[in-house]
Structure formats: structure tokens, C-alpha cells
Amino acid sequence: MTQVADVLVVGGGAAGAALAWRLAQRGVDVLVLEQGDWVPDEAIPKRHADWQVRARRYWSPSAARRGWPADYPVRNLGGNPVDAFVYNAVGGSVTGWGGAMWRLQPSDFRAATLDGFGRDWPIGYDDLAPYYAVNEQEMGIAGLAGDPTAPPIDPLPLPPVSMGAMGDRWMDGFERLGWYWWPQSQAIASRPYRGRPACTNNGHCTYGCPTGALATPANTYWPAALRNGVRLQTGARVREVTLDNRGRADGVILHAEDGALRRATAPVVVLAGNGLGTPRLLLMSVSPSFPDGLANSSGMVGRNLMVHVQTTVVGRFAERTGADHGPWGATATTRHFYETDPGRGFKRGFIITAMRGFDALDTALQVGGWGEGHHAAVEHHLNHEAVCWVSGDDEPEPHNRVELDHARTDAVGLPGVVTRGIGRYAQHLVGVEACALRRPGPEVGGRRRHAGWPDAVQRRFGDKQALAVQRLELHERRSPVKEVGQ
């Protein structure tokens, strides 16, 4: 059985959904193959009283821990390995995001010319600016135009989400340090928008929004795309990109939901399987013309993996912080360290976002211990904390890579993936965060993340001025992923 389309898209996440939506507006017959399925409302942790437990297990962004039927195995190896954030579902990895939305800066497109970092893009910021504006309208971005560090933009469709009392404290702290700040743009409805209700401040958006105020491709692009005639096939595990007699892609072979092999063809084939799924499919597409994988005669498919190195530092405040109220990331953000500073010892920079604190279960598992003193420790920290979060891009290097993992296979026998990489500046990011959250000489626990669960890194810092509050305490935190369920 063969399905035929004008354009075949592999992957129904953010990129695949937006592309299909746009092409369908032009009358193009689009078939999208998605390995996962729609996420049912009852599967969203925040719809249940025990959401903290549910979120840590079957909603985990780690495929190995989550174990959804559609997942393929992912292992993360190398020095300071990243725990890759991947969801196989309609909407892709945005299924588990918190809604933070930034535009790239003009310098990001010319990083090689400016800083010797990676490669320059073949297009510039001005080429993408109109499409950023379209996406902001479709997703219903809440924020404030006028950021002095960015090119001018039109007003965003929604006003900023409330930053709450902690936002005021963060703003004061940034200003004491001489750091510029701006309200965080969020894909969260601060007012009713296109059928989505306004945010009700349920908190911890990455655990699934129970009302739909958080925008995802599943509640924005996909409904419109389907109305315009896009065909979406879920449960489709693509195993190979096929070639015509000229050596050009002309379709794919896939396992349908029942496991049977099927074929789909189109004159245009688009791979939108994220930074792991796309090289995985190319490497699986072995043929006489490409014995090492499609488009891999150079051996570079899967290499130069770039991850969003992320760390968090947790600070304790004497007064209550309202940590469990409001969107997880909707406070103040700064690009004060965004551009390259030769004195830091690495290229390019990073974003800092000041956030609310952790939920009760996260807090208990990280600081409570077990036995005597558990309740006192939890009471000491719960709702007295806030988080400073930093994210930047690790440099593309050949040893940072994605490989096939033939030792671990998915439900139909296709290989999983292994990622190998080292975050070169995670320790420095923790140091910058500690400028915002410290008293003299604490032991600081940071988390380095690739849009997912952390690896622990530690560093001791010397005397620096505390940012926003007196009597601030910092504490080493072990990764909760390694503690739950042991």
C-alpha cells in the first residue's frame, strides 16, 4: 500500500506542524508522518491531584524513564553527558515545554564571522523577522515589545504574564548588579486568545497545562492545518528514506501503527524529527549509493551536535516566595551576557531567566532526606525558594554527536540513538547564576541540562554581593532523576 502526496513531512512537532499549516494554506497536498500520537487530556499530569508523581514518571522528558510506546531508546554518554529532552507525540518535544519564547539575535546568524563560532547562517535576522511575527500571532505570545537589546518588533498579541512578587524581587536584584532585564515572553495566554483561556496560575507548565492556556503545536498549528486538509498519520515509524534512479529522495518506508510495512511517496520529502530523530533516520537510510547513511559520504551526519546547555541555581529566602503560583518561567530575563566576552574563555553567551521555585515533591526529594529531620528540612525550603536559570549553546564540535544504538531497539526493532558530548561552559554558567543568588562562600549545586533532566555540577564561589535579598542560602542539589524510584 502506497500513499502519495505533494509534500511528505516526517515529524509532527513544532517545525513539521508549522510547515504543514503553511503549505496547506497554499493548496499543497501534505502528508505528515508522526511516530507518536495525540496526548489525551487524561494523560496530562496537572489534571490530577497526584500530578507531581505522574510528571516525574510517565511525563518525564527522558525517553528512557518515560517509556511511552512510541519512544525509541536514547542513551547519553561522554563527559558531562546531556540527558536529551525528546517527546514522540503530536506536537513533538514542545509537549513538555514551559512556554519561554525568544527570537534569535542578529549576531546569532553571523556567529562564525563575529566570533569564530560554528558556521554563519545562509540567511539573516531580517529574513526571518516576518516569520517570527507570524508565529507570535499563531502561538499567542504574551510579552512586551521594545526590548532595547533587540531589533524593534510590532506589539505582541498579548500583554506579559504577571511576574508576581518574585518578579519584583528579581528586577530589583538585576538592577543592583547593573544587569539589564526585560519581561519574559511566553507562549501563555495572559488573556483569552483564539479559544484558549487565560492562564489561571496553576504553575509548573512543563507538567502539562490543564486548561490549554499554554500554547503547543497541538492546540495552535495542528487544528488549523487539519481544517486546511493536511493529512496526519500517527503511529508511523519511518525506517528509511527511499531514492529514485537519480539518487534523490522520493519517499519513505514506514511501519504503520499495526506494524505492517507501508510506503509513502512525494516529490518533496522533509525531515523534521529534531536533532536526534533526523540524523537517526538519515543513518538508518542505507543504500548502495549511501552505504554509511543518506547524505553521509562525508561522515558528518550526526556530528557537531549543539545542545542548549542549561543550569539552575536555587536560592532560599527567609520570606515566602509564592514559588508554586504562576507560570514556571514568567518573571524577568536578561541578555546581559548574550554576546561573546573573550574574558569568559568560551565563545558566544547565554540568557538568564529568573524563575519561581520547585513544587513540594521536587523540594522534598532534593533537600528533605529521609527519616529524622525530613519534615523540618522540607518546611525550611518549601515555598521559600526561587530559581535562577541560564541557557546557551554549546559549540558545534565533531566529537559531540548522535550515533545509532543497535544494542537497544524500539518496538519494531529499529535502533535507538546514543548522544556523546561535553558541555564546555556549564561550570561558568553556574558561576554567573551565583552572582544573582549567593551569600559569601556557599557550596553551590547547579544543573546542566539539554532541555531536560540535569547532570549535577558543583563549584565553590568566593565573596560576592548578594543580589536581591539578605540571608540568602544556597544548597547543593542532587539530580532528582537519579533519586526517585531507587
Image: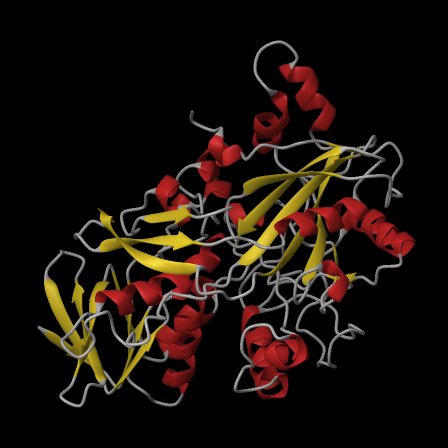
Residue 477 location, quadrant: top right
Q: Where is residue 194 in the image (x, y as percent from the top left)?
A: 55, 69
- The correct choice, above or below, for 437 with respect to 152 in the image is above
Residue situated in front as seen by the camera: 110 or 191: 110
Q: Is residue 4 left or right of residue 442?
A: left
* Residue most extreme to the top: 372
Q: Visible in this render: residue 37?
A: no
Q: In this view, does 474 lie to the left or right of 119?
A: right
Q: In this view, does 301 lie to the left or right of 478?
A: left
Q: What residue is at 39 percent from the left and 54 percent from the top?
A: 419
Q: Where is residue 98 in the image (x, y as percent from the top left)?
A: 57, 54
Q: Visible in this render: residue 476?
A: yes
Task: Specify the color scheme.
Answer: secondary structure
- The correct choice, above or below, for 18 with respect to 389 in the image is below
Residue situated in front as seen by the camera: 300 or 11: 300
Q: What residue is at 62 percent from the left and 22 percent from the top?
A: 368
Q: What residue is at 69 percent from the left and 60 percent from the top?
A: 345
Q: Where is residue 57 in the image (x, y as percent from the top left)?
A: 42, 37
Q: How many labels does the image show?
A: 0
Q: Which quarter shows the N terminus?
A: bottom left
Residue 123 location, quadrant: bottom right
Q: What residue is at 56 percent from the left and 27 percent from the top?
A: 365
Q: Which quarter shows the C terminus?
A: top left
Q: Where is residue 34 in the image (x, y as percent from the top left)?
A: 30, 64
- The correct choice, above or below, for 417 with respect to 30 in the image is above
